[in-house]
Image (cartoon, rainbow, N blue to C red):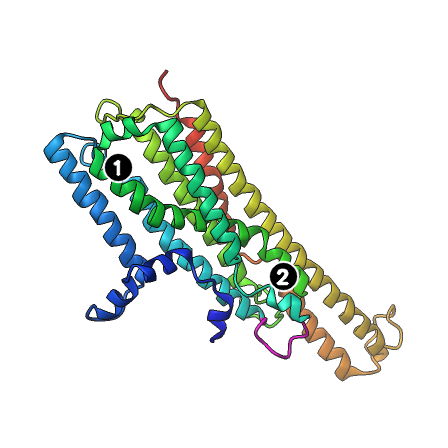
């Protein structure tokens, strides 16, 4: 087993794709092999939106993305979700390896080392997936109502969507993306703190070797924000463009506005926590190293409080400590650059700014 396989979870959507033969299909197709979940998503969404949905619209005049393009936000969320999910788990594996967890010389307790084997345990993901399905179907039956769905979409599309695309494609992707995002921002910093990683002070980027962690935190938040914006567009577009579009679904009410704000707050709190916690870890390590070098310098001179060159007893030791100190001082204590902070700031403000700026007609 490679290091990447050790630290990367096998995703639910990968298991589903393999069970339905998309792994074999990927190998049978000419050219380079495709990632099986991409094939599953492509086939599943084309059947729903390219066949059932279009047939319903052309033959029976049912609701369709042809008349309501905003409904394409759901497949867009699914496509972005599977791409983002793969990215998050591959980047987690790369970040862990880059930190040195796979280095046998690193003195880490085996029980702590084993905690890095995967982002979220398989059991938790399966239990959460089943719970999400129960909540979804409860909402479908008691809030949306099956007769209403049949009237809007027709029996064929409803059966396919509720037995195939939602339970086997859309929900497992979006659920696992959500739980993976939370784990990235709440679990990774705690694991790093327990493992007590040192900083790589000779990092040419001056980020202590933590840049892969910072990139993962940043980009996972971008994916989260993009999904949130697509959800916003899917529900608000028909209302905002009511003179051009119509929808059989009711406009989002105050409860939705609160829900959107709540999801936004979760995103803001999680990225604030992960960035601050990672910064605290890096700052503590840097300060410990500076204190150690300070002691080295004091021991290399006769009188630490007399700034005379003649005071230096061990010049070689003194110069080595000074050179190391310059690398340590240049190391930043946030795993991000100024440009990354600017991007994060914009993505933090955008969803809630849209939510607050939009005034839905009464």
Residue 74 spot, x, y in % from top left? 32, 41
Q: Which quadrant is the C terminus positioned in? A: top left
Answer with left or right where residue 331 lies relative to residue 144: right
Answer with left or right where residue 46 lies relative to residue 203: left
| Element class at badge 2 | helix
Which residue of the protein is positioned furthest toward the right in this rendering?
A: 303
| Element class at badge 1 | helix
- Out of 277 and 190, give the one closest to the viewer: 190
Comes first in the chain, label 2 or label 1: 1
- Out of 99 and 47, give the one closest to the viewer: 47
* Label 2 Cα neighbours within 10 Å, binned few <14 / some 14-19 / many ≥20: some
Return the residue at label 1: 158
Q: Name above or below for residue 262 compared with residue 203.
A: above
Seen at 55% across and 47% down, the residue is 271
Q: Are marks 2 and 1 in contact (CB under 8 Å)?
A: no
Q: Name above or below for residue 21 compared with residue 346.
A: below
Q: Name above or below for residue 312 compared with residue 180.
A: below
Residue 53 visible to the viewer: yes
Residue 10 spot, x, y in % from top left? 44, 62
- Out of 316 and 135, give the one closest to the viewer: 135
Seen at 64% across and 56% down, the residue is 190
- Residue 192: assigned label: 2
Measured in 3D between alpha carbons, the distance from the residue under mark 2 to the one under mark 1, in whole angstroms, is 46 Å
Classified by dominant secondary structure, the portion drawn in magenta counts as loop
The reply to whether the magenta stretch includes residue 79 is no
Where does the magenta region start and end? Answer: 100-108
Answer with left or right where residue 355 lies relative to residue 299: left
């Amino acid at each position: 087993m490679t290091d990447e396989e050790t630290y990367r979870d096998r995703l639910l959507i990968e298991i589903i794709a393999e069970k339905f033969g998309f792994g074999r299909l990927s190998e049978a197709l000419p050219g380079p092999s495709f990632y099986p979940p991409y094939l599953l998503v492509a086939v599943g969404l084309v059947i729903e939106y390219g066949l059932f949905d279009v047939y319903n619209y052309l033959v029976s005049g049912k609701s369709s993305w042809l008349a309501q393009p905003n409904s394409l936000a759901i497949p867009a969320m699914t496509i972005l979700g599977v791409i983002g999910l793969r990215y998050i788990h591959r980047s987690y594996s790369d970040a862990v390896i880059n930190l040195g967890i796979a280095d046998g010389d690193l003195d880490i307790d085996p029980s702590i080392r084993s905690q890095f084997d995967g982002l979220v345990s398989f059991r938790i993901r399966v239990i959460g997936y089943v719970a999400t399905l129960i909540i979804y179907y409860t909402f479908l039956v008691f809030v949306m109502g099956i007769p209403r769905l049949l009237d809007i979409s027709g029996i064929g599309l409803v059966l396919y969507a509720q037995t195939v695309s939602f339970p086997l494609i859309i929900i497992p992707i979006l659920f696992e993306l959500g739980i993976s995002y939370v784990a990235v921002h709440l679990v990774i910093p705690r694991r790093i703190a327990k493992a007590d990683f040192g900083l790589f002070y000779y990092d040419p980027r001056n980020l202590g070797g933590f840049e892969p962690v910072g990139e993962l935190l940043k980009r996972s938040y971008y994916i989260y924000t993009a999904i949130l914006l697509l959800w916003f567009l899917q529900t608000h577009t028909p209302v905002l463009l009511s003179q051009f579009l119509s929808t059989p679904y009711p406009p989002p009410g105050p409860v939705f506005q609160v829900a959107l704000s709540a999801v936004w707050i979760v995103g803001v709190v999680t990225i604030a926590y992960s960035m601050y916690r990672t910064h605290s870890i890096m700052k503590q390590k840097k300060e410990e190293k500076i204190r150690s070098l300070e002691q080295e310098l004091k021991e290399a001179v006769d009188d630490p409080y007399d700034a005379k060159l003649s005071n230096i007893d061990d010049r070689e030791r003194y110069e080595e400590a000074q050179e190391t100190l310059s690398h340590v001082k240049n190391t930043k204590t946030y795993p991000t650059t100024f440009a990354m902070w600017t991007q994060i700031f914009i993505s933090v403000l955008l969803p809630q700014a849209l939510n607050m700026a939009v005034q839905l007609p009464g």
